[in-house]
Every structure is written in C-alpha cells, then in structure tokens.
Image (cartoon, rainbow, N blue to C red):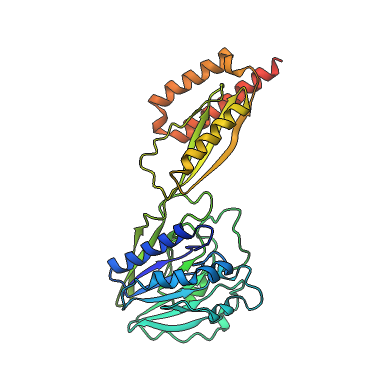
Amino acid sequence: MRFILTADLHISTAEKDYSLAVLNEIVGVCARERCEALFLAGDVFDSRADVEALRGAFRAGIENLPPDCAVFFLPGNHEELRAGPGGAESLDRFDFGRARLLTEKPFSFGSPDPQTELLAIPFQRDYSGYRAWKAPPKRKPLRIVLAHGTVPGLAYTGPDEEEPGGILDADLFTWLKADLAALGHLHGGFSVRQGDTLIAYPGSARVWREGEKGKRRVLLGVTEASSVTLREIPLERAGEYRVVPVYAAPDGSLRVPRETAGFSPADWLSLEVSGLVEDERVAVQALERLQGDLKEKYRKVTVRTEGFSVLGGVSTHPLALRFIKKWEEGAASLGAEDPEAYNLARLRGLGVIKEILESRR
C-alpha cells in the first residue's frame, strides 16, 4: 500500500485561499504518487466554526483524488474548539464526502488493505486507560495506529503548547502492537523508532503560527509485508516562516540585508527590527512603509521590535557612527559565515554604546 500521512492543516476562513491551496497540493501529491490512502491525523480544520463554513470546499478538494484512494479523517483537538456539548462526536452530523470520519472513542478498527490493520484513536484529553480498551489482537502483517496527541520525551514542544492533556504514552503503541504510529498535533515533523514501532509526525502541513520554521511536508508511506518506509515530500504552496533582520540606522532609515529573491508569495515574513535611533517616529514610519510594501508580495508580514531602542543625539555621535561602520564592513566579509551571531553582536554592541552614552549625561 502507498499512502500519504499529513496533519494539522488548520483549514480556516481567516486564511481560506491559502489553507485550501495546501489541501489541493496534498491531493495532487496523492495522485502523482499513486496512493491508495490519505491519512489525515487531526486538526484538518482550525475550529468547529471552520468545519461548518468550509466542509463543502473540503469535500470538493478531496474529490480530485484518484477514485481508488481512500481518505481517513481523524478528529484532533481543533475540531472540538468551540463545539459545545457533544464534542468530536457531533462531527458525525456533517458530510465530508469521500472522507471516512473516525470519531469512535476510545478507538475504531478497520483494514485499509488486505495486509494492513488500522486502529484509529481520535483526540482525547486522557489516554491513560488504554490497557483496558480491549483492542483486537493483531492478525495481519502490519498495524498502523493513527492518533492525535503528544508523545512526551521525543521532541521539545515549546512553552506554549496550546492544548492541555492529550499525552500519548509510548507504551500505548507497544501494547497495541503498532508497527507505525502515524501522529498529528506536534507541528515540527520527525520520525523515531521505539522498540518495534516507528513513531512519525509529519508536522503541520502549513505554517499556522509564528516560529514554525522549515519546509512544510507530508510523509509518503510504502508498506511491504510487515514493514513500512517513509519519505518526506515538501509542500511548495505552504510557504515557509522566514525571519528577516531589519536594521534601523541612527537617522531612522532602514536596511533589509537579506536577499528575498528566493522567497515564495506563500511565506510568512517576520521582520525582526534592531537598532539605536534618535527619533523613533521616523523609524516607525519607515517600518510601516516597508511592511505595507511586503504585504503586497507575501502571505503574512509581522514585526518584532524587541531589539529597537531610542537615544537622542545618537545619529551624529562619533562612537555610534564608527561602530556601525565597522560592523557593516565586517558583515560584508564575515557575517555570511554566521549571520545570527553577527546580528546579535550588532544588537549587543549598540546596547553597550547606549549605556555608555546615557551614563555620561
């Protein structure tokens, strides 16, 4: 069996065209790779309101799959957001076209092909009772467990993981005799083997929140006998999260040193502004113009100004001007080797200069 594993598409009315373009690319990948199944491991939609508004567009999108490609839709925590009483089970009232909705808790069981078993676990805040689930014994060469949650200890999830609970003990996959744990919820993709189980997160199919760096992707799975192999396929229409350093000169003018020729219109640009300026208003006006120009070209443009500070008289002070000149000379010759370290040196150097000049007043 050949299949695509994807998760965390977060289709939303707020970014309808963008998120549906990513869905259409995933459908195109399935067709190109002659896949027999598409596994959607949760958070296909961003909220229950988005399910209600865009399920028709979702149905239309997956209709372009090859006729023999089955679609398995596992609910995640976002399908429950603002859902009211009933939670994920109430999704059964909606028509998702060709997609088979896997809402049964604690799990549902089926066979996507003659050699493979599928045990599907929709999002739950507490999976701790898995040893009492009475899962059927494994009878086929390969078992895939499709689930949505966090396996602790495998990857850093960040300080702002938005959903409490949903912890999947790795022993759950051992207990269920899974050959592949196909998972959603963590937006950074990775695969790791624990015992006899290959645990795989494809990562978010699109850039959903700030800081999600790197290419978005899906995983192409190929099963053979009792083994499965996975290969990453990048998604071009998802774009990338790009950090763009913006330097504010003492006179308030801005410089964007990074070349943007290779960027995609689907990219999310984060402008990280640093500098020591004499008049903040001049720099802010220049920044607003820059942001407006970039918004015409890219999906989203946000601004971070933590490295931005103000000091009267700095635009003509010899020490500040001399430091910036030397930094620019060095950046031209050495900064490309380690741009982040060189940019940090500029920021800290200007901070020290600010402290020196303020202490002399």
Q: Residue furthest right?
A: 361
Residue 308 pos. (x, y %): 60, 31
Q: Residue furthest top?
A: 318
- Between residue 349 and residue 57, name the one nearer to us: 57
Residue 147 visible in the snapshot = yes
Residue 196 position (above or below residue 311): below
Residue at x 49% of width, y 79% of height: 95
Residue 162 position (above or below residue 312): below
Q: Residue 131 occupies which quadrant of the picture?
A: bottom right
- Between residue 130 and residue 45, name the one nearer to us: 45
- Between residue 77 and residue 295, name the one nearer to us: 295
Quadrant of the rendering where the N terminus is positioned: bottom left
Residue at x 59% of width, y 32% of height: 284
Residue 329 pos. (x, y %): 42, 21
Residue 107 position (above or below residue 160): below
Residue 292 pos. (x, y %): 51, 39
Specify whether 347 is left or right of 220: right
Specify whether 103 is left or right of 263: right
Specify whether 219 is left or right of 52: left
Residue at x 57% of width, y 24% of height: 350
Residue 204 visible in the snapshot = no
Residue 84 pos. (x, y %): 66, 73
- Between residue 239 and residue 165, name the one nearer to us: 239
Q: How many marks?
A: 0
Residue at x 48% of width, y 60% of height: 16
Q: Residue 144 occupies which quadrant of the picture?
A: bottom left
Quadrant of the rendering where the C terminus is positioned: top right
